[in-house]
Amino acid sequence: MNKDGAEIDSNWIVSHRPARNKIDPLRPYHWMVEKERNAIGEIQETGIIFIANRECSFKCLMCDLWKNTTTDSVPAGAIPEQIRWALEQMPEIKQVKLYNSGSFFDERAIPVEDHGKIASLVSGFDTVIVEAHPKLIDRRCLEFNDMLNADLEVAIGLETVHPEVLQRLNKKMDVSDFVKAVKFLKRHHIRSRAFILLRPPFMTESEGVTWAKRSIDLAFDAGVECCTVIPVRPGNGAMDLLMKQGNFEKPSIDSLEEVLTYGINLNAGRVFADTWDLSQFSTCSHCLESRVNRLEQMNLGQQILSMTSCNYCG
C-alpha cells in the first residue's frame, strides 16, 4: 500500500504513466560508446545499444525504460537489424552491451529465432553484456552463450535486499531468486553484474545508503563480479506521485559518493556509480562538474580519490 491507500501493482503503476515515445522497430532508440574497466582491469571502449522492443512484462515501480518500448512484439529480424545498424555507426569497440529495457531472454521481447543472428553480429568482441530478470535466467541463457564467440555477462536487477521494499517495487522476485540466478550463471562459467538502487521509495536518505551497502554485500557474496549503483529518479508517473505523497525523495550525490567508496573499498569486484544526469541529485552547481569527474575516474580506476573542496557548499 502507498500513503493514499492504493495497492501498488502493475495496474496502479501503468495508470499513472505519461505517454510513451514513438519507436522505430528497425532502429535502436539510442546508442553510445563509453569507457569501462573490464574484469581484468583494462579500460575498454564499450558500445551500448538500447534496443527497441516490446515492453518488459514485470512493470517495476521505479522503471522508466518502458517509455522507449513498443506495445507489441517486434517482427523477427528487426533486432538484428538494429544491432547491425548501431555497430556500423560506432568506432572500434572491445565490448558491447545489448540493453533492451527488460530481459534479453524474454521471448516476447527478443525472438528466440533471432539469437543466432544476434550472436553472429557480436561474436568477436571481448565481452557481450545483456540484462535479464532473475526468473528468466535458465537454459535459454546457456544456449545463447553457446552461440557466442565472446564472453557473456548478464546484468541482473537486485535493486535492494530490503525485503519489504523489494516486494513493493512490483519486481515479482525476492533475494533468493537473485542468488539462485547468480549461482546458476557462475556454475556455467558466465559472469554476472548486479544493479543496485540508491534510495528506492519508502526509505530515508540514511536508510537508502545503508541498504545500498547491504545490497552490494549480498551481491558479491552471491557471486557477482560487478555492481552498478543507480540513484533512483522520478519521471515515470508513479514515482512522481510517490514523491508528492512523501513516499520518495531523490538521493543526494553525497550518498552516491559514499556508497561507491564503500563498494570499491570492499575489493570484492568492480563497483560503478551511474553518473547519468547527476545534476538532479546535487544542490551546488559550482562543484558538480568536479564531483561527476571524480566519480567517473573512480569508476575507471577503482580507487578512492580525494574530494575537491568547494567554497560555495563546503
Image (cartoon, grey):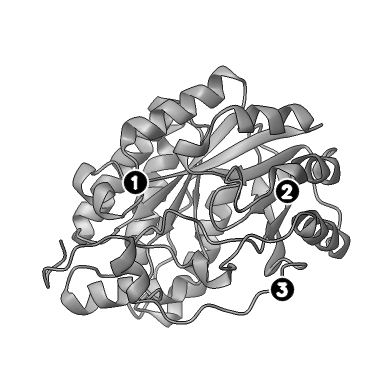
Q: Mark 1 points at which residue?
A: 172
In the rendered structure, the answer to whether residue 268 lies left or right of residue 149 reads left
Q: Sequence-wise, which precedes: disc 3 or disc 2?
A: 3
x 53%, y 61%: residue: 55
Q: Three-letter amino acid code at disc 1? A: Lys
Q: Can you say whether 203 is above or below 267 in the image?
A: below
Instruction: List x then y, in percent, for residue 100.
Output: 61, 56
Q: 245 left or right of 140?
A: left
Quarter where residue 61 is shown: bottom left
Q: Does the residue at mark 2 contact the one at mark 1 (Cβ under 8 Å)?
A: no
Is residue 251 in view?
A: no
Question: In the drawing, does residue 243 fall left or right of residue 128?
Answer: left
SS at circle 2: strand
**Residue at (55, 50) in percent of width and height:** 299
Q: What residue type is labelled 2?
A: Val
What residue is pinned by disc 2? 96
Quadrant where the image shows the C terminus? bottom left
101 to 280, vertically: above or below: above
Disc 3 packing (10 Å; few <14; some 14–19; many ≥20): some
Amino acid type at circle 3 is Asp
**Residue 133 in the image, given as x and y percentages of width and height:** 48, 43
